[in-house]
Amino acid sequence: MKKNIKNKFYPIIFFTALLLIWEGISRLKVFPPFILPSPSSILVSLVTNFTSMQHHVLITLYEAIIGFIIAILLSLTMAIAMDSIIGFKKTLYPILIISQTIPIIIIAPLFIIWFGYGYTPKIVIVTLICFFPITISLMQGLATVDKELIDLLKSMGSNKIQIYKFVKMPSSMPSFFSGLKIAATYSIMGATIGEWVGGKNGLGVYMIRAKQSFATDRVFAAIIIITVLSILLLKIIEFAEKKYMPWLKFSKET
């Protein structure tokens, strides 16, 4: 226990030292403020401008959550379909892999053309970004289920639905939650990328406007909010994981 607490102090000490060095460089005016603002000025900007940023924060969070939920539903459907139907997996799995070689920033402008400047293209981008890690993680979890348990249920006359309900899905939950945690950290970023390409509101739009005004401190303030939102979503997933699989906490402690 003491060792774990001690290990947590190392990144805190390093991050604090990094901020102090950054603050010192800014105070010495090695770089102009519009190039590298000090951490203190970024914090002041975050506090003073937070009221005007709230609307943008809520829009980005809305796009990220809706896209994330859609990605979960699609991933569950796709992973189970590819696990249960071999031909389906052989057909779609290579396409799924190839799709990840295309950077989302390249095809994002197409979504703006197709769906306009509203919420839809941002939600589509978030869904695409989150879909892959959840699907792949769940597929791997379903593929590594103990075959003896499956054979046991088959010998007892269980059908496919019962096998998935009592064996495959519970056994694949650790992999599923691993994919959820990866996707959760990507969701806010995906919404922001969509707003960069084209939008009227959101943190991405706020950052572009701040950049055009050379208000770099406001850009960093938006980055801090994006980071906090991503960590918050990650912690929510971790909380759900512990509630759904309490035995994992026990196994880690032992």
Image: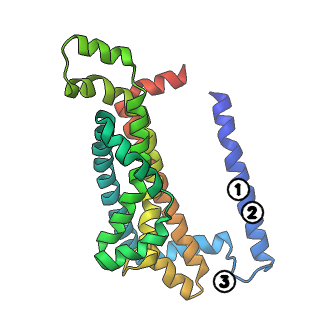
Q: Earlier in the sequence, mark 1 or mark 3?
A: 1
Q: Residue at x 24, y 11 (%)?
A: 155
Taking depth in this image into account, of 24 and 110 the one nearest to the observer is 110
Residue 52 drawn at (x, y percent): 42, 78
- Give the Cα distance between marks 1 and 3: 23 Å
Q: Is residue 176 visible?
A: no
**Pointers 3 and 2 in contact (CB under 8 A)?**
no
Q: Residue at x 48, y 70 (%)?
A: 105
Nearer to us of marks 3 and 2 is 3
Q: Is residue 59 visible?
A: yes
| Quarter residue 174 falls in | top left
- Give the Cα distance between marks 3 and 2: 19 Å
Callout 1: 10 Å neighbours few (<14), some, many (20+)? Answer: few
- Numbered badge on residue 159: none
User: Which residue in the protein does label 1 denote?
Assistant: 16
Q: Earlier in the sequence, mark 3 or mark 2?
A: 2
Query: Callout 3: helix, strand or loop?
Result: loop
Where 74 falls versus 239 (above or below)? below
Residue 166 drawn at (x, y percent): 26, 23
Taking depth in this image into account, of 67 and 158 the one nearest to the observer is 158
Taking depth in this image into account, of 100 and 89 the one nearest to the observer is 89
- Report whether 191 appears left or right of 5: left
Query: Callout 2: helix, strand or loop?
Result: helix
Q: Could you tell me which quadrant the C terminus lies in?
A: top right
Residue 185 drawn at (x, y percent): 47, 54
User: Which residue in the protein does label 2 denote?
Assistant: 20
- Give the Cα distance between marks 2 and 1: 6 Å
User: Which residue in the protein does label 3 denote?
Assistant: 34
**Pointers 2 and 1 in contact (CB under 8 A)?**
yes
| Quarter residue 224 falls in | bottom right
**Of the residues shown, which amino acid type is indicated by label 2?**
Leu
Where 247 falls versus 188 (above or below)? above
